[in-house]
Amino acid sequence: MNVMAGKMENIFAEVVEVCVMCRDCEERKAQLRISVELQKRQSPVHKGDLLVRLTDDVDACFLYSLHISEEDFQSLKAQQRIRLEFTSFPDMLIEYFNECRSEQKSSHPRFQLLLSSDSVALQGPANLCVMERCSYQDTDRLTLRLKPGSDREVNEYLAASLTSLKSRLEKQKLELSHKLESDRQQFQTRLAELEKSCQDLTQGRYKDESANNELKCKLEGAKQDCGLWQQHCRHFKQHVASLKKENHFLHTTLHEKECLANQLQMRVGDLEQDIKTKDQQVVHTSEALEPTKQQKECVEEKAESKEHEIQKLEEEVTSLIYNMNKGYYIIDKFMDEEQKYRHEVRTLVVKLQAKDFELKKQQKILQETQAKLEHTEKDLHETQQQLSSKDQQVEKLEKQLNESKDLLQTNKNVISWLNRQLHEKQIAEMPHLPEPLESASALSSAGLQTQFYPQTSKAASSDLDAVPKHTQSAGLDPKCFR
């Protein structure tokens, strides 16, 4: 491959599924990375160079490449009947590769990449073909002849890959550090908020519990007061019933006394009539009946005694009427007190119902608060678990970074050793250099003028057989030394 001057612009770098076919091997599918790089020049004669590279992310020593200049493209254009110019050829390549990527998951893809080689296990040049598959015919849209990379090219590719990996790891480490710091700050802020919320909820819970206890005590006191009022009501009802019985007895007694008073009044009226009659008789007979004065006096004495008895009976009737009125007054008073107690009991029942409703509302709020507290504790537990998982991921990434640094240092040592060995080999072969260089230049020019199939040299493969065995286990795949 010719050495290119200037900086290359990477215009395509994606992993594409490729069918690999070798001699005496079965067809297999591999995920290979295809890179297309373009070098633009300001010269009107040479507009640019194109580099197509085929690598494997799993096998670091797998490297196939093709360098296409504008002159090489003219030969390729004539061979494969390409109807585009060199400036549009990279866009066509990228379009083909994107078509293959978009249909690689399909069971019957229309476009597919095929890497074929006549050698065993891809040890020599290989053809990269863009195949368009149809139900009746497979069409070869484009074929590129790739050659395997030499040891120097593989080493340069590995060095560039290690440098890119190192920069990517440093960038990833920096991003992860920033992200971890941001996540820690967010988690700490969230944790502080949750702790504050938990404290507020705990205080609210304690306040609710104290208020609930006070309400329970008030409810118990109200229940006791209600029981006392109910006892008082039962006592008053019993007292009213006894007063009603006493009133009924007084009514009966009064009725009897009234009957007796009526009888006495009738008797007094009869006696007064008798007295009047007797007075008239006495007046009529006083003159004639002088001897009967003593009898008259006796009758008067009897009349006086009867009047005295009538006065006593009237006094008893008056006393009974007074007692009856007093009983009516007491009954009315007890009825008023009973209505008053009933009104107070109704008011107390309404207050107890309101307190019961408030207590149920407080219990519901307490249950909701407890549910919120449990949900907050669950979120806090999950946040702590996520923080622990993030710490474990950071430790794992730091461990991988340390291993990558060790691997990078080991690979650098191997590359320096290979460079020293190559330098010593070149110094040892200095007298024999002119003839091989002339033959190599002649072979390269002949390959470009004919069928665009560049030849490769296997002289360097035998020189690496003398590499010490301890370098094979120092971090690179043994395929790097074959």
Image (tube, grey):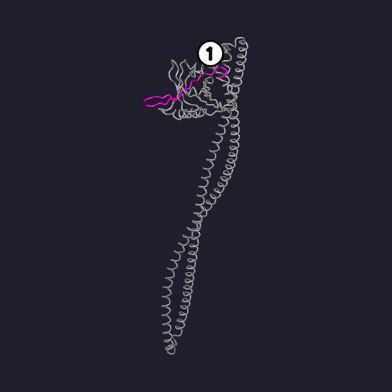
Q: Position of residue 55 (x, y in %)?
A: 52, 22
Residue 227 appears anywhere in the view = no
The answer to whether 29 appears left or right of 166 in the picture is left
Q: Position of residue 171 (x, y in %)?
A: 60, 30
Residue 424, picture quadrant: top right
Q: Amino acid at mark 1?
A: Lys
Using the rendered view, name the quadrant where residue 162 is placed: top right
Question: What residue lies at 55% left-to-right and 34% top-to-bottom?
Answer: 386
**Does the image show residue 146?**
yes
Q: Nearer the viewer, residue 418 or 364?
A: 418
Which residue position is annotated with label 1? 458
* Looking at the image, residue 418 lies above or below residue 8: above
x%, y% of residue 1?
A: 55, 19
Q: Residue at x 44, y 70 (%)?
A: 254
Mark 1: few/some/many CA within 10 Å (<14, 14-19, 20+): few
- Which secondary structure class fits the magenta region best? strand
- Residue 97 lies within the magenta run: no
Tag 1's secondary structure?
loop
Q: Which residues are magenta?
A: 128-154
* Residue at the far front in the pictured view: 45
